[in-house]
Image: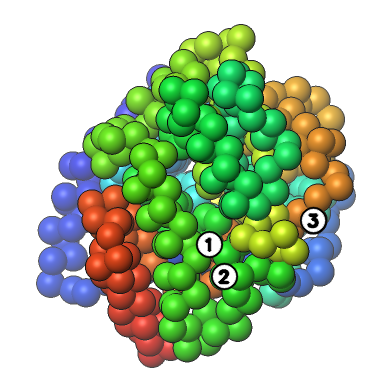
Amino acid sequence: MKRKIVALVMAAVLASSLAACGGNSGSTGSQEPAESAAAPAASEEEAPAESEAGGDNAEAAGDVSGATLEIAVTYTGDQLATFNKLVDQFEAESGVTVNVAEYGDDYEATLKTRMAANEMPDIWQTHGWSILRYKEYLMDLRNEPWVSDLDESALGVIQDSDGSIYVMMISELINATLVNLDVCEAAGVDPYTINTYEDLTAACEKIKAAGYTPFGMNSNPGLMTNYAGTFVTYEGEMAEDGAAQLDGTWDWESYKNSLVKTMADWINKGYFYEDILTMDANSLAERFADGKCAFILGNDPGIIVTAQTLKPDAKMAFLPSFSSTKDGVQHVAVGEGDTFGIWKDTSNEAAAKAFLTFFAKAEIANEMNQATGKVAALKSCMEIDDGMGQKTFQEMKDKCGDRNIFYDNFWDRKYMPSGMWPIAGNASNMLFEDASEAGQEACVEYMKENYVDLYEAAQEG
């Protein structure tokens, strides 16, 4: 039986031990994509490479009974229930005891505190940061047998420039536009004819006139970042400012005159829920399932999975993030989905590797992916994945094959300095509180000031 760790108590203990020392706390923001060629994959017959970490742990692979692992996860709700069920199966098969650390909203803050204390869980989910934030704490896993099963798209996200791979990745996170097809049909809108944000605005007018809310999002950082590149970065968009964004010279004028102006226009036209600043994630999924809104911008198919659990007959779709001009690109963000890394200083290396090998089994990874709605990252899992995430992604590819779709890392992870994610969340709230010209100016100035400070801090660090 798993012993659940009380996260807040542990965090408080660690925090008190660090009160007199300023640990490195790096904030949520960018993750640079790997640019190297594929790492050499171990054959299934090869034994995992020996590591200096956990040198006292001499168990052979498979002989791990009696070991205890702490595993920190981001899962909540039904996803956590599925994970715990699979952990029960691993415990029964291996004889290992697993303590699942459930930190909820305190996940990042707690792990940052634990990094500063150099007291990490045996295994933890890196939630998009295996290379940029966590790699100095993680074991290099490039010689593990499951590496050969990773899809090329996964390697492009998690492989470091020297070929190191620090995580076992069972799914990819894809992010773009979610559509309630029932609402669109009732309003006389064909979402597959939407290519630009101008097209989207016209569709929203028809949806609002039909008595529905066009956008079902809550206020969050993704509204200011997840489709920003389709306004101010990529080829053919209103601005192609990627170079300036990366070298710290960006003046944010193009951002103010495109994305922020468009968002403010949508707010002032009443395209969002009036309670957007207080609506929680559960309400969002319920309203989307009930056919009360048409679009969710900058999100992943996990909401579709949840919504169809609530209303199985609802018809929904996944589409790219649209372009800001007719000559621009439509974007789908791809990043780390569910990834598990091993602490390089763990004293339970063999058991930790056994856990990753267990979760790399196609049937196990597929069951977890079914619960999260994410797209499989293991080739063997892709062959059996009939889940909603994979299905909606493939339908998008089939129905939008004639579009100029660009697949790249998340915009903030690639183009913004670390720490911009919570800043974007605050800016979103600011814009919804005041979408006037003055409010738009204040929102952008806030983001610019923090961008400059974080960029300079990154150069000094």
Which quarter of the rendering shows the C terminus?
A: bottom left
Q: Residue 250 in the image: x percent, y percent?
A: 48, 83
Residue 361: quadrant of the picture: top right
Q: What residue type is labelled 1?
A: Ala
> Rounded to the nearest whole Å, what is the CA distance between mark 2 and mark 1?
6 Å
Residue beneath disc 2: 232
Residue in the image at 67% along x and 62% along y: 325
Q: Which SS class for mark 3?
A: loop
Residue 329: quadrant of the picture: bottom right
Residue beneath disc 3: 404
Q: Is residue 87 visible?
A: no
Residue in the image at 50% along x and 50% along y: 127
Residue in the image at 72% along x and 59% along y: 326
The answer to whether marks 2 and 1 mark residues whose Cβ atoms lie closer than 8 Å is yes
| Marking on residue 413 | none
Q: Residue 196 in the image: x percent, y percent?
A: 65, 52
> Rounded to the nearest whole Å, what is the CA distance between mark 3 and mark 1?
17 Å
Q: Which SS class for mark 2?
A: helix
Q: Residue 395 in the image: x percent, y percent?
A: 78, 32
Q: Which amino acid does label 3 sit on?
A: Asn
Q: Can residue 330 be seen in this view?
A: yes
Q: Residue 40 in the image: x percent, y percent?
A: 83, 62
Q: Which SS class for mark 1?
A: loop
Along the line of sight, the residue nearer the viewer: 94 or 228: 228
Residue beneath disc 1: 228
Q: Which of marks 3 and 2 is nearer the N terminus?
A: 2
